[in-house]
Every structure is written in C-alpha cells, then in structure tokens.
Image (spheres, rainbow, N blue to C red):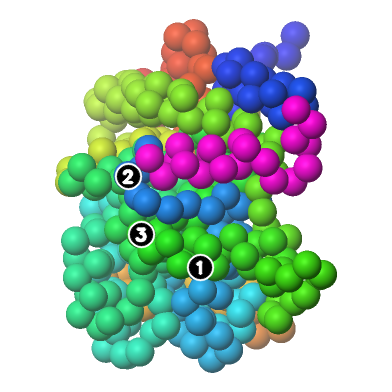
Amino acid sequence: MENKRIYLSCPTMHGEEQEFIKEAFDTNWVAPLGPNVNAFEKEMAEYVNIPYASALSAGTAAIHLALKILGVGEGDVVFVPSLTFSATCNPVVYEKATPVFIDSEWDTWNMDPKALEKAFEKYPNPRAVIPVHLYGTPAKLDEIMALCEAHHVPVIEDAAESLGSTYKGKHTGTFGKIGIYSFNGNKIITTSGGGMLVAREEEITKKATFLATQARDPARHYQHSQIGYNYRMSNIVAGIGRGQLLHLEEHKALKKAIYQQYKEAFADIPEISLNPLNPEGDANCWLTGMRIHEESPVTPDQVMDALAEYNIETRPVWKPMHLQPVFADCDFVTADEEAADSVTEVRNNQGDLIRRPGSISQKIFDRGLCLPSDIKNTKEDMELIIGIVRKCFGK
C-alpha cells in the first residue's frame, strides 16, 4: 500500500472562500471585475499598512507592470538576486532590459548588500533594484535601501514569498517604491493564481490597474493610446483571496511552528543547518530550507530520494539564475572572494561554455533542499519526515 502523499506546501481552504465565491455567483459578478476585487485590494492594503493596491493575475504580472511604470526599457540595467525563482527576473527581459545578478550572503540567503555595493561601482546607473525575501525571510533591508537611496535608484520589492513577514515591525513589500505579492497555489495564502501590486503613491496603482485592463482610455468607444495587458484579477479569484486573508496569521503561526520543529529535531546533527532567519525581522517561514554542510558525505539528493520513497514531496533550493542557460551571458557580482576563487562552467543556450566565479548562492544550491512545510502536516507526518532525515545521517 502506497504511503499517503505529503506535500511540500499546498493550498489550505477554510470555508469563507466559498462564501465570497457564492456571493459573486448569486449577484452574477462572474465577470472579470467586481466587489471582491475592490474589497480584496482594500483588505490587503490594510493588512500590510500601505495606502494603495492593485489586484493582478500573478506576482509576475505585478513585477512586469512595476518595471513598466518605472520606465525600465531596452538596454537598462536592473539588479536582481541570483538565488530566486525565475519569475523575479523574467519580466526584466520582457522589457529588453538587462538583469545583473547579485550574490547572496550567509546570514539570510538573500541579496548581499556588499555585492550590491560592488554592482553599483560597476554599473552606477541601474534603472531599478529588485530585492527578494527568500522563502519568507526578510532581506537586510536597512543596508539595501540605504544603498539604493544613495544612488537614487527605485526599489521593486519582491515579497512574493514573504506575505506576513515583517522587518523591524514593518511589512515586507512596503519598503520599496513598489511592492509585489504572489497568491500562487503553494504560497502562504492562495487564490489559485494571482498577485498584488502595492504602493504609497496612488498614481502608481492607478497606472498598474490601467495597464492591466488593456490600457483602455476613458472614452465611450474602445480607444487605446498605449499597449496594455490582460493582467487584472477576476472577481471569483479575489473572493478566494478574501477568505484566505482571514487566516493568514494562523497560517504564519503554523509555518513558524514547522520551522521550529525541524530546528529542534536536527539540533544534534552538526552537518545540518536550516535557512537562517533575520533577527531584525519576523519571517513567515513559508518554506523551511535545509543545507547540508560540505564535510558531510550525505547529499541533498540522497535525502530527497529517501523521502520520495515514502511519497513525501521535497524540492531543491532555487538554482541560481546566473547558472541558468537562459541567463548565462548576464553579468554576476559576488563579494565573497573565497567562493569566487573556484570556477563553475555553464553552457548558454547557444552551447557556448561560460566560466562563472564560485558564489555563496551556488554553495547554498549545491547543498540545499526544501523540506515539507505544509500546514496540514499531522504530528505523525512530521515524525515520519524527521525520522527519515535523521536516518540519512545515521541517527
């Protein structure tokens, strides 16, 4: 008999979602926009304590519109962390701009301010910087924001993974000129697919909403003076989001408890360390990452394979963007001289061999994996997962 499936992170529905959806059906607000969209924007803005929000079809769409609003275009340089999901940097390429990838630091696994400073020395006039809060852990925002302000460069804050996380008491996603969130199926709350763009300037979210609805001019007939996009969130999807938002703090508490349980369970295994949490912040612990130190003979693949035998889902840590074939020709900046002493060879899409310096982000990827972090995991599920991992290390 096959073991039940234990997921990495999957949707947790409660019931209120159905009530908002039913209301939309009962009032025939099944058309793309409607009261749920307006209410979800208002409720999200109130939750993260920011004045304005625009509900969109995805976090990726939010990043794309943020770049458009800031005027990022062909040939512009945009600084992006290398250790992230491709959705952070794909929209940079949509606009024919050039991503320059920034290495991680060990304290939070996020964009390294020292590497960012080096990038500013090499490229003094980037058009934007996109920090990410990896797996829900706030980046070193004081240092990152200070550098960006000193160089008068706007920040698009990718908080796709960190809704509910705070840094010094302030919500991630609200530090930059524009912030974005994701409600993808595996996020801490989900609308099945969807995103949100937030800002302190009303003109920014107005522009986002305008562009997201095909940039239709305010005329009686269909008139368009610029290119638009079909990026608006639907009224049905927004209803799911409203129901989920009611349980965000509950989800966050459960995610944090999972991280703590893993931390205590592996405390006696010196070869293991979990993804570090920023002491200046309060992480939502969306996913718990685990890094196996280089001196251990155990590999991430061995742990993932052992868990897979019991039908338990895991995932490697994000593969750094500067090591991806599609971005192999883009520049990469690291401040870690020790790591940079080594060289990694990557083939680009043309098959050319590109020599890359070693990096912290690569070291995290090479020895990292994400553990099951689903808030529906039972006590027995967690004991099974922990027992299998411990057995891999002879415990």
Per the image, the residue denoted by label 1 is 66
Q: Which of marks 3 and 1 is in front?
A: 3
Q: Mark 1 belongs to which amino acid?
A: Ala
Which numbered disc, 3 or 1, marks the residue that appears first in the sequence?
1
Query: In this image, 249 relative to 346: left or right?
Result: left
Instruction: Report the front residue among 379 and 59.
Output: 59
Per the image, the residue denoted by label 3 is 200
Q: Where is residue 57 in the image (x, y as percent from the top left)?
A: 65, 51
For the question of whether residue 28 can be seen, the reply is yes
Q: Looking at the image, which residue is at 46% across and 16% down? A: 382
**Quarter residue 124 falls in:** bottom left
Q: Point out the stretch of residues depicted in magenta.
A: 27-46
Which numbered disc, 3 or 2, marks the residue that appears first in the sequence?
2
Instruction: Report the front residue among 259 and 357.
Output: 259
Residue 49 disc label: 2
Residue 32 disc label: none
